[in-house]
Image: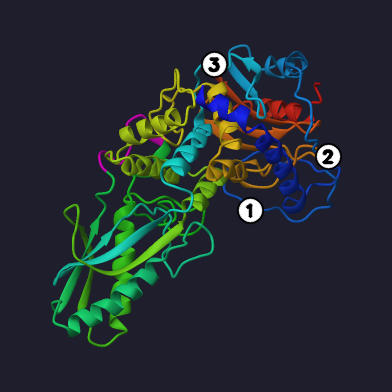
Amino acid sequence: MKHASQIRRLGITAVVLGLLMGLVAFFLIPVAASGFAAKEAVEEPVPPVLAPAAATALPPLDPAAPAPVAAVLAAKLDPILSAAPADASVSAGVIDVASGETLYSHAGDQPGIPASSLKVFTAIAAMQVIGEDHRFTTRAVLADPNTVVLVGGGDVLLGAGTGAESASGRAGLETLARRAAKSLVAARAAGETADAVSVQLDDSLFAGPALNPDWDASLVTTNNIAPLSPVALYGARANANPKAERVGDPGMYAATTFAKALRTAVGSAAGGPQVATEVTRSAPGVQGTELGAVTSATLGEQVRFMLEVSDNYVAEALGRLVAVKLGQPGDYTHGAAAVKQALADLGIDTTGMALTDTSGLANTNRVSPLALARALAYAATSEHAALRNLGYGLPVAGATGTLSTRLGAVDTRGMVRAKTGSLMEVSSLSGLTVTRDGRALAFSILVNTRDRTIGPQRQLLDAAGAALTRCGCS
């Protein structure tokens, strides 16, 4: 297969990955001193780095580190996975990154519900198709003498103010309003506008239903998702607080915020037209004179944000944007198909894969753990730098994102980088780690139970991740 041959050709790159993972963990992630106790796992946005703790030395990473012996590795993992409840469905796969060989499979080729581990696929597709350095542009356009149109260009992490250093809120609607106001004043002086203008919203970049019919209605009421729009504040949240409620019409909420800021900005200048604060939707594909524009954080930064805090809204927007980049409609159906196609185009095996969204919220998604592990191994050894960077965007055990309170022991903190996943009766963990011998592994574990709990058996997933990291197994 294409991805296997690339892995064989770039085996040295895999060793570099292992070295870099260790170095990043040592220099950037404070490793807890003995006695660190992990708190109860809660998948919510958290500060990017924990308070400094006493550092301890990491094990050396040997360029000639031996690969785990499959039978020895199985002897470590089998007892952990078999401890799941009798009615639980557990599947797992482990890949040796340097060789691409499958070291472990427990129903590894069996498609299961991936939950948010699916975001790994979305990240790979977006980085490959759209590009790590791409920035999304939000524009204000004078469509005619009476109408200013806010045109959504795919940035769903806009801010209300003048911008922020973080990926969420990097481009500010207040900044856009000030730029547009300056242009409006000049246009009014030139007789190109009426005495009053209204504001409209062009959110036609995305098509089809704003909500995926495969999503349970409770996902909206619990703030896990909101109707999709190509223009939104803070991932469709009411304000910059990462726990703020998501709004019912994110595009209109953003446009109304812009209209108010534009009215204020024009009002503070002399000679501009009156600006109405009531907003309506425009016809699609608005043409006109650009009054101002703001650009988002890079796609690479947005992908990292999405992976660290497991933001469903950003993941769904990226899926639709991949479809648009490929010349397809920006709806949920084409978004999921475009992500799968992007994986196939890279040579990643998609046999048995069924994607119905790009966030992992739908319990109709079907992905095998070996497919996830192979994709992670492929990215880690890819000839494309953007894909090699994917591993550094994953949550870091005991330190960042949704792994900040998990795998916090001295020998796992900073060593495991993985995407978590939680749905009703579903848990998953998919990522990269370095063994005690210094060998880089890609892994994925999916657990499905019938206990009606959110994210069940996380302790099993963490125990398996710890076993991989602690394994000499040679």
Q: Nearer the viewer, residue 1 or 365?
A: 1
Pinpoint residue 314: horizontal percent, then vertical percent.
Answer: 44, 46
Q: CA distance from mark 1 to mark 3?
A: 34 Å
Mark 1 and mark 2 in contact? Answer it, CB < 8 Å: no
Q: Residue at x 37, y 32 (%)?
A: 336
Determine which of the numbered discs, if any, sits on residue 469 in the image: none
| Snapshot quadrant of residue 396 | top right
Give the crowd class for mark 1: few <14, some 14-19, many >=20 residues within 10 Å.
some
Label located before the other in sequence (1 or 3): 1
Q: In this orientation, does residue 223 appear? A: no
Any magenta on residue 241? no
Specify few, some or many for label 3: CA neighbours under 10 Å numbering under 14, 14-19, or 20 or more.
some
- State how far apart marks 1 and 2 are (Cα): 26 Å
Q: Range of the magenta residues?
A: 207-218
Element type where label 3 sits in the image? loop
Relative vertical location of residue 408 with respect to residue 468 in this rendering, above or below = below
Residue drawn at point x = 41 percent, y = 46 percent: 130
Q: Amino acid at mark 2?
A: Pro
* Nearest to viewer (mark 3 / mark 2): 2
- Residue 2, position in %: x, y? 51, 26
> Helix or strand or loop: what does disc 1 sit on?
loop
Secondary structure, mark 2, is: loop
Q: Residue 361's image quarter?
A: top left
Residue 98 percent location from the top left of the image: 67, 29
Q: Which residue is mark 2?
A: 60
Name the mark on residue 109. 3
Mark 1 highlights which residue? 48
Mark 3–mark 2 CB contact (< 8 Å): no
Query: What's the residue at 52%, 36% (across, down)?
Result: 120
